[in-house]
Every structure is written in C-alpha cells, then in structure tokens.
Image (cartoon, rainbow, N blue to C red):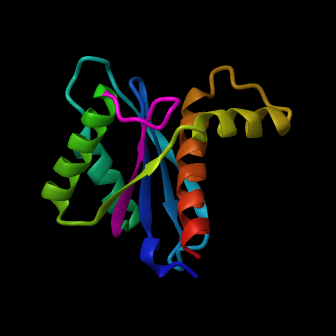
C-alpha cells in the first residue's frame, strides 16, 4: 500500500493538452481523469488544473518531468518545474516530479494493443499517459 501518493493528481503537461489521472484513496491504482486543452503561447491553465484536483479530492500532485533522451533537463523541464512551484504555492499541497520520458509511448502502445485507433483520441492518450506515470510512481513506492 502506498498511502504516500493516495489521492494524488498526476499531470502529464503537454503543449496542446494536459492529461490528468488520480490515484485511489489507498494509493494503489491510478485511473485516467480526463484532460485539459491548452492553447500554445497562452499562460498555463493552473486554475483549471487546481479546480479539477479539488473536484477529485486530490491531496497532492505528481507532475511528469519531460527529460531529454539522455535524462537531462531542458528549457521545457524548467517550465514544468515552474508550473509545479506555482501549483504548490497556490494550493499548499505537496508537488512531486517524476521522469515521464516513456509514458506517452506506453499509452499509445496500450491503445494500439487494445485494437483501438488513436485518431481523435489524443486527449484520452494524454490522460492514459498520466495514469501510467502515476501507476509507475505507485509501483515504485509500494
């Protein structure tokens, strides 16, 4: 059991969409929780992320860190860390980060294995990527 990440909202922050997932009250299972569309060049929709977290009864945040192929931080990683810092400041809740390099690929693979098409379902893929990210964290800590 991983009470440390119980009711955490996972955030897979992309340039076009933000995939969301939530862990159960026992911190064992991650479930997709939808996505938020965002317009490139606009300010991050932190208010929407926080509102969704409140709606789901989240007790903290797990944000995917987009590292490069070698595992190094980039300008985009810095932006994500700033987003996390702002969420922590606004909510007073814990914010953790986790390497998300392979989550979207894993989500795409999962959808294809189910014999589904990803056409018109990019938001679902982003939400699934967030769930995979959160499940990885739950598995590591259990």
Instruction: From the top left corner, tell me how far across and down residue 76 is, in percent.
Output: 32, 28
The residue positioned 32% from the left and 20% from the top of the image is 39
Quadrant (top left/top right/bottom left/bottom right) for the C terminus: bottom right
Q: Residue furthest left?
A: 89
The residue positioned 76% from the left and 25% from the top of the image is 117
Instruction: From the top left corner, tell me how far across and down residue 68 is, in percent.
Output: 46, 30
> Would you say 130 lies left or right of 61 here?
right
Q: Which segment is the magenta one?
A: 59-74
Q: Quadrant of residue 56?
A: bottom left
Q: Residue furthest top?
A: 41
Q: Is residue 65 magenta?
A: yes
Vertical position of residue 133 compared to residue 91: above or below: above
- 139 and 58: which one is in front? 139
> Would you say 77 lies left or right of 102 here?
left
Instruction: From the top left corner, tell me how far across and down residue 97 is, in percent.
Output: 38, 53
Magenta-highlighted stretch: main secondary structure?
Answer: loop
Residue 75 makes an appearance in the image: yes
The residue positioned 68% from the left and 20% from the top of the image is 119
Vertical position of residue 120 compared to residue 70: above or below: above
Quadrant (top left/top right/bottom left/bottom right) for the N terminus: bottom right
Q: Quadrant of residue 90?
A: bottom left
Residue 124 makes an appearance in the image: no
Q: Is residue 54 magenta?
A: no
- 74 and 122: which one is in front? 74
The residue positioned 28% from the left and 66% from the top of the image is 94
> Would you say 59 lies left or right of 5 here?
left
Instruction: From the top left corner, tell me how far across and down residue 99 is, in percent.
Output: 47, 46
């Amino acid at each position: 059991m991983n009470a440390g990440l119980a009711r955490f909202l996972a955030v897979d922050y992309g340039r076009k969409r933000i995939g969301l997932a939530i862990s159960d009250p026992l911190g064992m299972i991650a479930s997709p929780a939808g996505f938020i569309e965002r317009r490139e060049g606009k300010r991050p929709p932190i208010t929407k992320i926080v509102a969704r977290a409140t709606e789901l009864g989240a007790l903290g945040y797990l944000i995917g860190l987009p590292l490069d192929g070698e595992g190094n931080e980039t300008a985009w990683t810095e932006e994500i860390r700033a987003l996390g810092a702002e969420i922590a400041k606004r909510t007073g809740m814990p914010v953790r980060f986790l390497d998300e390099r392979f989550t979207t690929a894993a989500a795409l693979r999962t959808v294809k294995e189910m014999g589904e098409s990803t056409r018109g379902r990019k938001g679902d893929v982003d939400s699934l990527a967030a769930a995979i990210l959160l499940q990885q964290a739950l598995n590591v800590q259990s």
